[in-house]
Image (tube, rainbow, N blue to C red):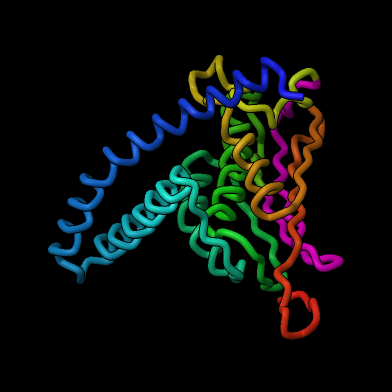
Amino acid sequence: MITYEHLQELQRFAELGRMSASLLHEISNPLAAALLNLELSDQRSAAVRRAHHDMKMLRRYVEAARQQVRGHSKATNFRVQPQLDQLKRLLVPLARKAGVRFDIIFPADCRLHGDPVKFQHIVSNLVTNAIEAYRDGPPRQQPRVRLTLAVKNNQLIITVHDRAAGIPSKALPHVFEAFYTTKGQSGHGLGIGLAIVKRYVTADFRGTICVTSSRRSGTCFTVTLPLAVDTSKKSAPLC
């Protein structure tokens, strides 16, 4: 049964979709101009080459977001390792700037079935939230975020663990609700990041996501995604 609260949530998502479509349209033109200027610049400079690569990646994200707003999604079998390599280029500098040590533990490559851009969104959102968890809490001597990926029972298990102050117990049951945020006092956060992450995990990858948190041990998000299946080998997982 559809409740009034559910209808309100759907209306807010629809409005967010319209705003996103307009914003993406406004971003596209200056992004294309910036890329053109970089292509005309001195490509011998390592800084220019890195900027050009990062701008191309940003254009890819914008195009993927436009496809998602239109209701299109590119599901395919993809390797996880290259996606992590791209994410590290964005997340490592972010952690370094925040003074947070960022560790990645990933013993073996594997393949998933779904949209690789949405996979990157899942991981980057969880890691970014973990880094930002240290922003408003008490100072920590060794702030650290650990991203761990492991394969078990034909599933990829992803954990993102921080040692910050934790999520308040009264807020914990609501963290995946759309437009619910604990970041309002610090002036950032719309309360849609984890809602979108959960939707991608459950609807796009047919996986699960859960969270545990306490003041002593920090916060740990656990995502479980089924591995891609090799149909030529009678449901053998692809690793």
Examine the rendering and report whether any part of residue 239 can be seen.
no
Image-quadrant location for residue 119 = bottom right
Residue at the spot 74% in from the left edge and 57% down from the top edge: 225
Residue 24 image position (x, y, % from top left)? 34, 40
Q: Is residue 197 above or below residue 103?
A: above
* 94 up-or-down from 228: above or below: above
Q: Residue at x 65, y 46 (%)?
A: 145
**Observer able to see residue 158:** yes
| Magenta stretch in the rendered image | 146-169
- Residue 82, located in which quarter of the rendered image? bottom right
The structure residue drawn at horizontal position 28% and vertical position 65%, both measured from the top left corner, is 49
Furthest-bottom residue in view? 232
Residue at 46% of width from left, 58% of height from top? 89
Figure quadrant of the N terminus:
top right
Q: Nearer the viewer, residue 168 or 146?
A: 168
Q: Farthest right residue?
A: 153
Q: Is residue 85 left or right of residue 206?
A: left
Q: How many marks?
A: 0
Foreground of the two, 198 or 35? 198
Q: Is residue 164 magenta?
A: yes
- The x, y position of residue 146, in whole percent, is 68, 50
Residue 122 rendering spot, x and y as whole percentages: 61, 48
- Vertical side of 226 occupied by 229: above or below: below
Residue 78: % across, % down: 59, 70
Quadrant in which the C terminus appears: bottom right
Q: Nearer the viewer, residue 101 or 53?
A: 53
